Image (cartoon, helix red, strand yellow):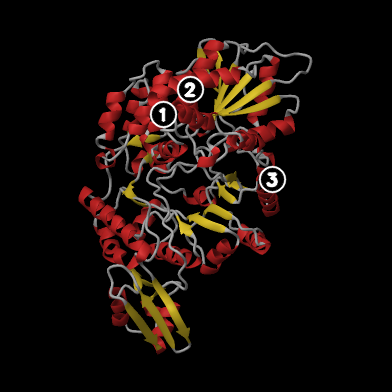
Amino acid sequence: MMLPLTPPGNGAGLRVTLVSMPWQSFELPSLPLALLTARLADVRPMDTVREYHGYLRWAEYLLTETGGEITPETCERVSVDDVFHGIGDWVFAGALYDDPEWRTAELEAYAADARGGALDISAARRMRPLAAGFVELAAREILAGEPDVVGLTSTFMQNLASLALARRLKEEAPGLVIVMGGSNCDGAMGHALHRNHPFVDLVVRGEGERVFPELLERVAAGQAPEHLPGVCWWKGDDSVANPQAPHPVPPALIPRPDFDAWQAALDSSAVRPYIEPKLLLEGARGCWWGEKHQCTFCGLNGSSIAFRAHPAERFRADLEHLVERHRILDVLTVDNILDMGYFRDLLPGLAATGWDLRIHYEVKANLRADQIRLLAEAGVHCVQPGIESLSTRVLELMDKGSTATINVRTLRDCEAEGITVSWNHLCGFPGETDEDYLDVLAQIPALVHLQPPGSVGRILLERFSPYFERPELGFPERRPHRIYGHVYDLPREELDDLVYLFDAPPAGISAALEKRLQDAGLRWRDAYPASSLVIREDTPDMLRIEDRREGWPRTDHVLTGAEATAYRALERGRAAAHLDVPLSWLDEQVAKGLLFRDGPTYLALATRGMPVHKVAESLEDTARWRPHV
């Protein structure tokens, strides 16, 4: 098959436009665009590469068309809060299917039930009639640059806007080569997307730093991408899916992201006064824990779970370059998990610089207090430690490699260091019982001085997770999540391959117990801002703990002698048999809310120091941006 493009000839380069359509956070650059721009500059300098930040243009368009009624803050809520409800995709589905009322009744029926009937779709209803006009505008602006190739990145709710644009571009410029890639194109999803949308010429499945430049070389030569790993292409009327690459992209091929085009677009944008921009940076890909024990519910690594990290000096050089170039101190790392070597090779150096950084990092919960202190000193202000549960038995069902003691200790030590913790309390795991949570429920009132979960609820069945790949683990029946019913016009068998989220009959705890957990989480969230349990004095013979937790008497607990020694020993968590105090004393401290009991293990709950309280934003519907390129 010859691709639509007529080869430029004479060694001339291609005109390539890379596009990021809604929806993604308006405060962030598009990391896939930034990485591919940098990669093409290295290996195909003859090409002219432009970026089109469609998600920013969408926010600008809405501001103008609604006279300021729909602000970027409203867009951000749809982009972030509604991602697991498919609201953003529904907004653009009407443009894709040429029907302004496309599946409106289905969305309204869904909204009447979601979030207990509290899902607000009013902003989406206001945006829907404007989507087709925006797609027309975006197509016109992109085609003004006379591109040979348009590459669209798609993660989470970017599919429908990208497909609507691709269709319009192909109608206006049949010879244009349209390529899609990103997390939504990984594995079976990429082939399903390609074969159901003939206006998309090529789909790249998996990471793109190596294959995308090679694909452009084939395009420039007018050659079919036979045997090019991961590429889906048309052979006549047949969609062909080449096998994905057997090995992940090595760190040496992953460039420093180039955010210059994003910065220029942002600086001239009407959106700029409404947002606080943040940088994105990548130190590693994959998950070193997941390589050995993939968490049963997690599919976020897709087909590339192998852990690879940049050397610490490379990460620091990239961080320093980007912060100085863009004068932005807020940095979100997109790593699935912190490289533990960075505690030795990276974080001490960052702490010594004195930079006023505000870094977000995903970490594993089993960190020592000194490691958490080092994170804070290095400028890490927010962590996502994958706590997930306060029941050790349920954590074992997840294959988390953690315990309730470890998780509560992490909450306590992050509280002491002023680090915001983003976490969810998950339930609905095959094999769990109501009894697994009764002790958790009884002890939550003692934890209200620690940071509460952003949400409490059942897991979703994610593609690529062990629960999805191995139905015998507890979810043998599954179907595409009902959110796709108000999005796609495709038969069930195609949705089975296309979508990321699935519904399955509920497993684990009863609905009544789930409701009790949710109510306890809400009470915890309400009590946290005014609660503290702090060690105020610590001398060799005495420990004074100031208790100012909501729901507890205002008390100063004074421990002396062996009791003070035992409490200090319990800061790491220990079994009763290793302590020189009677079991009755330990249980008395549990009743006072001074200790957390996890089976035979007891943990001190008082913090050393009390920063200003910060409550993490709800993660119920927050996309964790880990884009494949």
Residue in the picture at 35% in, 81% down: 557
Q: Up-down: is 410 above or below 50? A: below
The residue tagged 2 is 134
The residue tagged 1 is 89
Secondary structure under the numbered disc 2 in the rendered image: helix
Name the quadrant containing residue 7. Answer: top right
Q: On the rendered image, what quadrant is the C terminus found in?
A: top right
Q: On the rendered image, what quadrant is the N terminus found in?
A: top right
Residue 228: x %, y % from top left:
62, 25
Residue 21: x %, y % from top left:
51, 29
| Of callouts 3 and 2, the N-terminal one | 2
* Residue in the foreground of this view, choosing between 184 and 263: 263
Residue 325: which disc?
3
For the residues bearing labels 3 and 1, Cβ distance under 8 angstroms: no
Q: Up-down: is 526 above or below 218? A: below
Residue in the picture at 31% in, 37% down: 120
| Of callouts 3 and 1, the N-terminal one | 1
Q: Look at label 2 and name its amino acid.
A: Phe
Q: CA distance from mark 3 to mark 1?
A: 34 Å
Q: Residues within 10 Å of mark 1 (few under 14, many from 20)?
A: many
Q: Look at label 1 and name its amino acid.
A: Asp
